[in-house]
């Protein structure tokens, strides 16, 4: 009986660890994300909490938070150069985020996670 | 002491003494040819220090900024135009180029003393080094950028709307390229925030 309860406790801890600390969540490196955002001039058009020509990081985070495909959607936004609507109503292709080395998806995903982590 | 007794003259007096042997024409010809040879050699030597190969011959540059530069548009792009180190970091006109080269002797001292001889030391000093270079560029209104780029040549049809708007605002405000375009061919120093991009998070 004692053995069984110990097993249940261990299984619960493992489940909790998997749910709460997925590899993606562990990967968030805030400083690296901030540096990449700075390098790519993201904040010329996006404030953290303030809308500029584009929506704030907070607005994006709130739009996608809780959605299963949130990270993928933001990654697509950062890498596809798709058309976006600016604050003045005009349209423009979004800048494709550049990394060193090029197309380093780990860095892009980290930036997407950083945007998603923005809190009010 | 007489001119007929040259053996007893000092070196300076010998230099000052008129030639008894050679004609003015011969002396002028030797001086002219010698001048060309000296000038050519001097300039060739100076230009040799302007090549990409020279700049990356030291590991301090080759292992750090050169690696980053290879991923940027100034190294590889659609049209095949390349800006090498000296295009951005050394003035084109002779006088300022010479002054820059003389100042670069400080970099030789840095090499001898090993001030950035490891990646860690380089990263620790990157902000200071970058700031020196940004100040130098700002002081000359980013002339090295403007050798190729100018506000006037920017097409409102071909440039994206937002960058065009920002460029025209910068022009009206009398800004220089380096005021906004920092870290375009190299990584920005860790934790560095560009002026004008600070917002409510700070």
Image: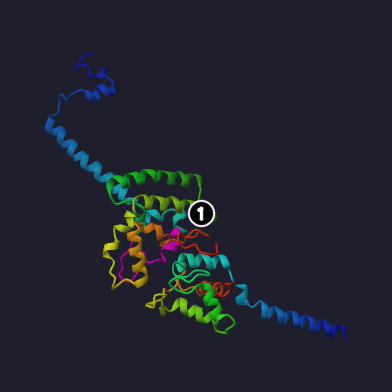
Q: Dot 1 corresponds to which residue?
A: B122
Query: Looking at the rendering, in which quadrant would you find the C terminus of chain A?
Result: bottom right
Say which chain tag 1 marks. B
| Picture quadrant of residue A21 | bottom right
Q: Residue at x 24, y 25 (%)?
A: B15
Q: Residue furthest right?
A: A1
Q: Height in image: B46 above or below B157?
A: above
* Residue B149 belongs to magenta span: no
Residue in front for this viewpoint, B6 or B93: B93
Q: Residue furthest front?
A: A88
Q: Is residue B194 left or right of residue A24?
A: left
* Residue B68 belongs to magenta span: yes
Q: Residue at x 35, y 68 (%)?
A: B165
Q: Position of residue B100 (x, y in %)?
A: 35, 46
Q: Height in image: A115 above or below A66?
A: above
Q: How is the image coloured?
A: rainbow
| Picture quadrant of residue B20 | top left
Query: Which span of residues is magenta-colored?
Result: B65-83
């Amino acid at each position: 009986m004692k053995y069984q309860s110990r097993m249940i406790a261990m299984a619960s801890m493992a489940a909790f660890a998997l749910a709460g600390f997925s590899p993606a969540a562990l990967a968030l490196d805030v400083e690296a994300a901030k540096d990449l955002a700075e390098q790519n001039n993201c904040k010329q058009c996006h404030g953290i909490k303030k809308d500029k020509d584009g929506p704030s990081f907070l607005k994006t985070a709130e739009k996608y938070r809780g959605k299963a495909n949130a990270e993928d959607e933001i990654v697509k936004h950062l890498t596809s150069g798709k058309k976006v609507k600016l604050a003045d109503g005009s349209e423009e292709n979004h800048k494709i985020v550049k990394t060193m080395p090029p197309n380093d998806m780990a860095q892009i995903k980290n930036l997407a996670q950083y945007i998603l982590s923005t809190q009010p | 002491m007489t001119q007929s007794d040259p053996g007893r003259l000092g070196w300076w007096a010998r230099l000052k003494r008129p030639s008894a042997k050679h004609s003015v024409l011969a002396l002028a010809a030797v001086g002219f040819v010698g001048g060309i040879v000296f000038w050519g050699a001097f300039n060739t030597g100076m230009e040799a220090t302007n090549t990409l190969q020279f700049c990356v011959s030291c590991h301090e540059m080759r292992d750090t900024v050169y690696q980053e530069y290879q991923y940027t548009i100034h190294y590889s792009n659609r049209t095949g135009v390349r800006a090498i180190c000296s295009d951005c970091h050394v003035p084109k006109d002779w006088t300022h180029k010479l002054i820059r080269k003389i100042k670069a002797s400080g970099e030789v001292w840095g090499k001898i003393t090993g001030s950035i001889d490891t990646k860690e030391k380089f990263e620790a000093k990157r902000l200071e080094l970058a700031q020196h270079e940004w100040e130098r560029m700002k002081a000359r209104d980013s002339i090295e950028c403007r050798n190729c780029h100018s506000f006037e040549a920017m097409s409102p049809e071909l440039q994206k709307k937002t960058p065009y708007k920002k460029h025209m605002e910068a022009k009206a405000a009398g800004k220089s390229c380096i005021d906004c375009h920092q870290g375009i061919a190299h990584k920005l120093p860790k934790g560095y925030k560009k002026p004008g991009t600070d917002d409510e998070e700070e």
